[in-house]
Image (cartoon, rainbow, N blue to C red):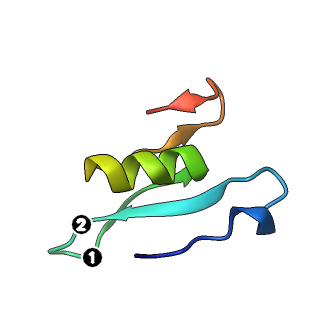
């Protein structure tokens, strides 16, 4: 399991890049916090944190 250190960020957010696994094309830059990372591990689906709405998506 990957261990991420969210304390190194002043706002608890870490940038996450979504990338096409076949082409390598970068699709988006999003952010994750500890809650989003835990949900990603639990569900198996990438979960992000929206800074503007301050909730998971």
Q: Distance between the residues labelled 2 and 1?
A: 5 Å
Disc number placed over residue 24 in the picture, else none: 1
Q: Local crowd at mark 2 within 10 Å, few (<14), some, or many (≥20)?
A: few
**Residue 36's spot in the image, x, y percent?**
50, 46
The quadrant of the picture occupied by the N terminus is bottom left
In contact (CB < 8 Å): disc 2 and disc 1 = yes
Residue 41 relative to residue 38: left or right: left
Instruction: Say how many tags the image has.
Output: 2
Which residue is at 59% across, 61% downward? 15
**Residue 5's spot in the image, x, y percent?**
67, 70
Disc number placed over residue 20 in the picture, else none: 2
Residue 17 relative to residue 31: left or right: left
Which residue is at 46% across, 51% downward? 38
> Label 1's element?
loop
Which residue is at 48% across, 54% downward? 37
Q: Local crowd at mark 1 within 10 Å, few (<14), some, or many (≥20)?
A: few
**Residue extending furthest toward the left:** 22
> Label 2's element?
loop
Residue 21's quadrant in the figure?
Answer: bottom left
**Residue 4's spot in the image, x, y percent?**
59, 70
In the image, 43 versus 32, the foreground residue is 43
Q: Is residue 3 visible?
A: yes
The quadrant of the picture occupied by the C terminus is top left
């Amino acid at each position: 399991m990957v261990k991420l250190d969210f304390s190194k960020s002043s706002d608890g957010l870490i940038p996450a890049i979504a990338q096409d696994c076949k082409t390598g094309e970068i699709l988006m830059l999003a952010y994750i916090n500890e809650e989003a990372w835990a949900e990603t591990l639990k569900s198996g689906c990438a979960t992000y944190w929206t800074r503007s709405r301050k909730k998971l998506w």
